[in-house]
Image: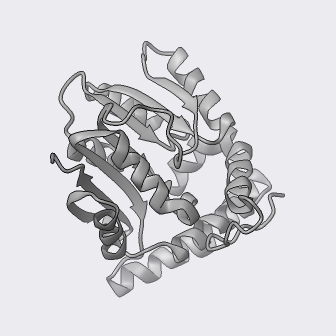
Amino acid sequence: MTPAIAPDQVEADGGSFQGAVRRMFDGLAPRYDSFNRWASLGMDEGWRRAAIARLAVAPGGRVLDVATGTGDLAFASERAGGHVVGCDFAAAMVRIAADKAGETDSTAAFQVASADALPYRSGSYAGAVSAFAMRNVRPILKPVLSEILRVLQPGGRVVILEFTEPTVAPVRWGHYLYTRVLVPRIGGLLTGDREPFDYLNRSIDAWFSPDEFAAMLSECGFADVGYRRLSLGTVALHWATRPSA
């Protein structure tokens, strides 16, 4: 079983939090896609469509998918006309994304890279996307956002999907029951490892509110920052642009 991970843990021992998260996702990689499908009740595809619609990169524009996982958001970006590169610090995830690309006519490229040290030229991307990954880099969140800002072209947009707590009480109670009780129990029974599902809940609890994360995007130098809630307020769709001057 994967060791328990506290999402607010300080990386005092040289990256213990990030290393533990990487190992967890490497282990989860073979069943990651099926986990996303059933845990989101199939809504993950709609969330990706909303993100790509908000990104609105011109056909042929270069798009970077930060913390791409198994590549689903990268492939959605490509279907919308983008020329896509996906990166992730979990090598097992990247291998699956590359295999999926090889099984289709996709030209998306995937590579292992840490989001706080992106191996790309400054101003080389028209757009950037990331889905449900910022919680996993919380100890280094500002360096990650600064790196995304750096690789964007002036006027380039970033779109980020992240979980959030619903504001309407009945929805919040139902969401709590589903994510805190049902998902960990069912996930643990299906996979033999409950820890990734418990980690999901801990990381959501430790995450910023949409207003707080929007403020952080502004602090890191982004402009035109905004967000909207999806799926009864359980997911926040954030966007921001690199200033043109």
**Residue 230 seen in this snapshot:** no
Hey, which residue is sitting farthest right in the picture? 1
Residue 13 drawn above or below residue 51:
below
**Residue 130 seen in this snapshot:** yes
Q: Nearer the viewer, residue 20 or 140?
A: 140
Q: In the image, residue 194 lies at what x, y percent? A: 74, 62
Q: In the image, residue 68 lies at what x, y percent? A: 50, 40
Q: In the image, residue 48 lies at what x, y percent? A: 35, 45
Q: Residue at x 58, y 65 (%)?
A: 139
Q: In the image, residue 175 lies at what x, y percent? A: 46, 74
Quarter of the image for residue 112 reads top right
Hey, which residue is sitting farthest top in the picture? 105
Looking at the rendered image, the quarter that the N terminus falls into is bottom right
Residue 181 drawn above or below residue 49:
below
Q: Residue at x 34, y 48 (%)?
A: 149
Hey, which residue is sitting farthest front in the picture? 245
Q: On the rendered structure, is 96 left or right of 208?
A: right
Q: Nearer the viewer, residue 164 or 82?
A: 82
Q: How is the image coloured?
A: one colour
Q: Nearer the viewer, residue 206 or 37?
A: 206
Total numbered labels? 0
Quarter of the image for residue 31 reads top right
Hey, which residue is sitting farthest bottom in the picture? 169
Q: Residue at x 30, y 75 (%)?
A: 211
Q: Residue at x 41, y 33 (%)?
A: 74
